[in-house]
Amino acid sequence: MLEPVLASGSKAEVVQSAALQAGEWITGGPQSERIGPYLRRVVSQAPIAGPEAVATVRAYAAASAPAVAALAPAFRAEILERASFAAAENRQDLARLLALELGKPLKDGLGEIDRVADTFAVCAAEARQIGGETLPVAGWARGVGTTAFTYRAPVGVALAITPFNAPANLLAHKLGASFAAGNTTIVKAPPQAPAISTAIVALLTECGMPFEAVQLLHGGGDVGAALCAADEVGVISFTGGAATGNAVARAAGAKRLVLELGGNAATIVCEDADVAEAAKVCARTGYTNSGQSCISVQRVYVQRSRFEEFVELFTAEVGTLTVGDPLDPGTDVGSMVDEDAAERVVRWSAEAAAGGGRVVLGGERDGATARPTVVADPPAGASVVTDEVFGALVAVLPFDDLAEVVARCNESRYGLQAGLFTRDFGRVIEAWRDLQVGGLVVNGSSNYRLDHVPFGGVKDSGFGRESPRCMIEDYTVVKTLMVRGVSLWGGRP
């Protein structure tokens, strides 16, 4: 299945995506069509899952879970290592699918596929580390004469619901960690990215992942809701918007959940920072993937004495970005996921200007391509400050002291990740302690992630942490063994 998907993408043909149900690739039946946001034509299609498909997938997952759990961690690790090499070997063709389906520039797509390769390698390493403990039960009188152990066992059936903005790497995280833990996984692909989702699953199966370990369905929210409610599913990993995340939680009921629900990330630039470097970093990381990242730079708070200097430098840096065809290797900013998303950038920048802010660059779109937009000093209640724009727009605001700006950042209902530029280590500790976020990047913007480092948020940004080690903990359960009358620790005198 991998070869025909990649071949169609390389020829700019309509890519026929596939579902994987009960060990069989399925391409027939009613189809959904994905219109490429830059090309403005159909670029891929996929079979839509109906109730019968959902029922088949549920039954097969439940029946397959024991077989997947019985695979030794070394075997699972070897498959993931092969997948890491395969992703690197096919990086150009996989990145092209991202450009076709999502308008993601090739340079961003290549970076995402490099991360896929890294993520599979990290998942393989973590599979080799799964173990347990010998418990110190004899340290308390009632435990004398007993020996106790634990080990981490697979949950059984996992559900991975992936988003459109990083559909390859986030699928690698969810599916890779779940398989490393010994689960079978049902993947619900984003409607905007059926071809790249098919390609990643096909890559894994061709590298030896048993069909019992993975199934893939396409469709809308009704398919996701039905899978979330399925009794067979023991853990759900979802990345997407806060409203949809709440719906996932309601449908799931009493299941384990890992929810990454977005944010409106802030980066703080103090007066002692290298302002030119901060402006360059924020310009490069505020518009990658057209700003469609949960940690993309959306708000930059600059100490007042350096504010105008930063705005000038930042605007100049943003002005150097090349906007255009995502299939052109020189393009920095491609199109957004659709025209509605691009219109949100235009609408919110106009709203900020009406409230007294300055649109110093952008505020326009051509179809789904939003020109990189800079809004200086918008009002505190503007949507660009309070909500997640998830687009090619950065707001720059002044502040007077660190405690004040931390309080302003914490007013947000989101709390995923923040950035801080300063040379003062005391400020670093203060911000790390007081910012209500899951992570802080020092001398970098909010938009920086290492795939083997814990990642996740607080408040409406969700809960749980998405790195393979943390996810394996969510994808496994601790099982305890107590042996009475046998002790490793000695007995009573």
Image (tube, rainbow, N blue to C red):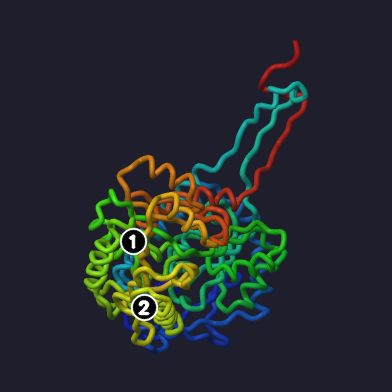
Quadrant containing the N terminus in the rendered view: bottom left
Q: Work out how far the residue at label 2 is from the one at label 1, CA to CA, in angstroms.
A: 21 Å
The circle drawn on residue 351 is: none
Residue 92 location, quadrant: bottom left
Quick check: 322 left or right of 175? left
Residue 389 location, quadrant: bottom left
Residue 427 location (% of width, % of height): 38, 44
Residue at x 59% of width, y 71% of height? 244
From what the image shows, is residue 141 above or below residue 322?
A: above
Q: Name the residue under label 2.
A: 103
Residue 28 location (% of width, % of height): 55, 85
**Does residue 387 appear in the picture of this structure?**
yes
Quadrant containing the C terminus in the rendered view: top right
The circle drawn on residue 88 is: 1
Q: Could you say whether the residue bearing mark 1 is in a helix, strand or loop?
A: helix
**Does residue 213 appear in the picture of this structure?**
no
Mark 1 Cα within 10 Å, few/some/many (few <14, many 20+)? some
Residue 311 location (% of width, % of height): 28, 65
**Nearest to N terminus: mark 2 or mark 1:** 1
Disc 2 vs disc 1: which is toward the camera? 2
Quick check: 386 left or right of 363? right
Given residues 490 and 59, the one toward you in this image is 490
Q: Which amino acid does label 2 sit on?
A: Gly
Q: What residue type is labelled 1?
A: Ala
Given residues 159 and 3, the one toward you in this image is 159
Given residues 303 and 192, the one toward you in this image is 303
Q: Could you say whether the residue bearing mark 2 is in a helix, strand or loop?
A: loop
